[in-house]
Image: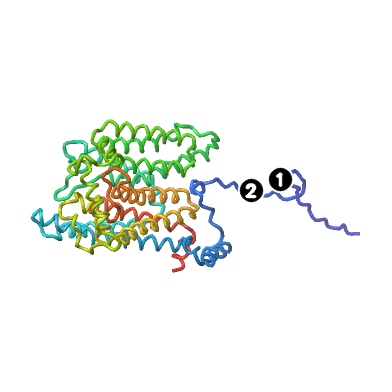
Amino acid sequence: MAETERKPRKPRTASSNGAVGAPRRQYTVRRRSLADTDGAAVQPSASKARPAARDALDFSQYRGWRMFLNPLWCYHGFFACVLALTLFGLVMVFSSSSVSMVAAGAAPWTQFISQMGFAVLGFLLMAAAAMMPLRVYTMHHLMYIIYGVSLVLQGITLTPLGIEVYGNRGWIPIGPVTLQPAEILKLMLCIVLPLSLRRVHAKHLESRTAKPRLRDYMLPLGMLALAVGLVILGKDLGTCMILVFIGLIAFWTSDFPKRWLGVAGVIAVVFVALFVLTSSNRMSRILATYQGCEDGAQTVCYQSMHARYAIASGGLLGVGIGNSREKWNYLPAAHNDFIYAIICEELGFVGGLLVLLLFVVLGWCMIVVAMRTPNKFASSVLLCLTIWIVGQALINIAVVLGILPVMGLPMPFVSAGGTSLIMCLTAAGVCLSVMRSQPQIRAERTKA
């Protein structure tokens, strides 16, 4: 009788839970990357990405008044406001500076031609900044180098190479033009502070440190202190306030403990108060603003009084473009810091309100996109740029109206000034680049 042939048995293996006979499972451990700490989700597969893209392109929820919450609408609205303010500013610079140019022995369009050249350069830089992907602004070595260069330039203003204008030492003459490095500092602080705070947050996630330590924030605190300190040495209180506001927003939107932020705010207020009290010029401006100007027009009140004369002369609809009386060398800096007074005189209450609404819409668009962006770095940069551009515009308007003392801050996109206009337009390009990190804006642009 033939023997039956037996099949060899498979060797038993232990499973992951200790059972015998089940095959061993293979596990892969995924290390969390720094990109995930920014609020960016892990990229889904192609089959799951298509429904997400369709959801991002669903704008049916933004109907009626909710259209103002549409990120795509805000993206285009932001660019429209920047373009409108810049073109309107060119017209008003020509109108407000023509008389002073003739009085100086130049052609009436000299300042306008100069401002037009700055605007062209600014738009080119805006286009270049807008075309850069978000990852360029997260290259900390590159951003820190540019920030360091801006600090060096600001330091040069304190040397004999710098010049003093209206008591503030913050300009460097370069041939026929002057450079104001503080404007570059504003833009760079809006980028390097969120960038350095982002790296602190990433280190906390990697080390799993629950309790924040002050030494972890020494780099961003040091960068802010250096910028503010150099500007204070140049006696520019207005720019110092803007830099402090940028710093407060950057730390507020990070994981910086709020109780520490409150202490830092109190310290900043104390230093600003000491800075004001130790200057007789600034004290006289504050007293003139809030105690009245009974001692005559040829005092520190002269500029503020003529600004009010211009606003009062404008009435509801204004005296017409080019028909201002105060620009006939009565109102100092009519085409710079006090251009809003000429706007109200020539275009009236309606024109002044229109400019204010443009800045409000500009700020609204930036805040809406920032609040709907999952990337914390992008959101923080947008909010810092908002407090710079819109906050400075509101302070400028408040100074012209006599609500705040004279600080020497120009109106963004509108006032004459090459460095200010170029850096504001460059900042607008950074905003457009950062806004594209918002999912709905990115999906719509990819579709187009």
Q: Amino acid at mark 1?
A: Ser
Question: Residue 324, relative to residue 266: is it above or below?
Answer: below
In depth, the one of 352 and 444 nearer the eye is 352
The residue shown at (44%, 53%) is 367
Q: Which residue bears the numbered disc 2?
A: 27
Question: Residue 224, relative to residue 120: is it above or below?
Answer: above
Res. 348 in view: yes
Residue 200 x/y as whole percent: 46, 39
Contact between labelled residues 2 and 1, with CB atoms less than 8 Å apart: yes
* Image quadrant in which you'd find residue 114: bottom left
Q: Amino acid at mark 2?
A: Tyr
Q: Residue furthest right?
A: 1
Question: Residue 404, relative to residue 430: is it above or below?
Answer: above
Q: Which residue bears the numbered disc 1?
A: 16
Residue 395 x/y as whole percent: 33, 47
**Sooner in the amino-acid sequence: mark 1 or mark 2:** 1
